[in-house]
Image (cartoon, grey):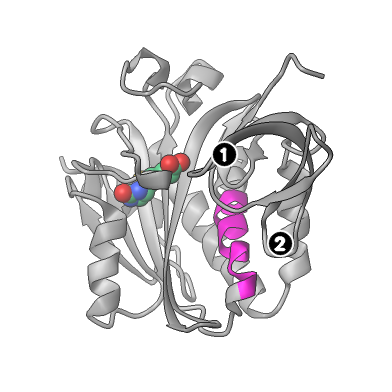
Amino acid sequence: MSFETTIVQPALRDVEPLIVGREVRVFEAIDSTNVYLRDQAHAGATEGLLAIANEQTAGRGRLGRTWNAPPDTSVLLSVLLRPTWLAVSDSFLLTMLAAVVIAEAIEDVTDLEIDVKWPNDVQINGRKVAGILVDVEMQSPDRLEWAIIGSGINVNWQPSNDPTITQSATSLAAETGKLVDRSALIRAIVQNYDRRYLMLRNGQHEALRGAWIKRLTTLGQTVSVETARETFTGIAESVAHDGGLQVRRTDGRLQTVYAGDVRVRKHDN
Ligand code: BTN
């Protein structure tokens, strides 16, 4: 029995999305669902196309890293959006969208409480359970052509046993103590994505910001920030309108971080 017939088809039975998931491609194994959708976007695919894989042979993570997950254990999916109506200065809303959708879907199917570490690590009690990768292409300097949002959720395996995964990571099974139904999770993700994306398209930016900020546990914490240029420590004070994390450095300067690794230093405060 294939991944498609046992997991994906039951997940999408009687689900009739308006945009996200109205077309779905399922793969037993693929290099990367984000890379697949990028080729589809270039070939003119319509928005809402969803790619789901049971295994990725070259899964991509943030900051040029790889994303590893054994077959049969995870939810690995990407969605192609064409938010040409969204100003580039608002594109962080897409990161917020994915984090909120994944958090709500996990809470729909488990009794776990999900939080978010800036910019988009989905966590349980400070341990990462899902990662989000947003790729975009621009139409012009201030308009998007397309966005591909990929999410990898650790469901039924123990990432802390994997020597290639260094950061503190966990899975839904490790946190709940039982196997979690991947099919139910995919169903909840598609339903939440479609609902929340329509809300965003209707201009409900503040509702999404509010839902994301409520889960963000980074603010007020002492953080160590690693960017391509430097590593520094400070207090995460706020999030700028464009999504940048504003960190008060120990020398008093306020620095806005857009790309980098932020580690919460639990014992410093
Ligand atoms: C991160 O580094 O936290 C982001 C990880 C994103 C992984 C997902 S799995 C599905 C999609 N396809 C990829 O190659 N990456 C994303």
Residue at mark 2 = 208
Q: Is residue 213 left or right of residue 126?
A: right
Q: Is residue 203 left or right of residue 262?
A: right
In front here: 171 or 84? 84
Q: Which residues are magenta?
A: 89-101
Residue at mark 1 = 122
Q: Is residue 224 above or below residue 254?
A: above
User: Residue 10 at x, y = what percent?
Assistant: 34, 50
Task: Rate crowding at label 1 as few (under 14), some (14 to 19) or many (20 or more) other CA atoms within 10 Å.
Answer: many
Q: Secondary structure at mark 1?
A: strand
**Residue type at the position of mark 2:** Leu
Q: Main secondary structure of the magenta part?
A: helix
The answer to whether residue 152 is visible is: no
Q: Residue at x 72, y 48 (%)?
A: 255
User: Residue 199 at x, y = what percent?
Assistant: 66, 72
Q: Secondary structure at mark 2?
A: helix
Lower position in the chain sequence, tag 2 or tag 1: 1
Q: Residue at x 76, y 17 (%)?
A: 268
Image quarter of residue 76: top left
**Residue type at the position of mark 1:** Val
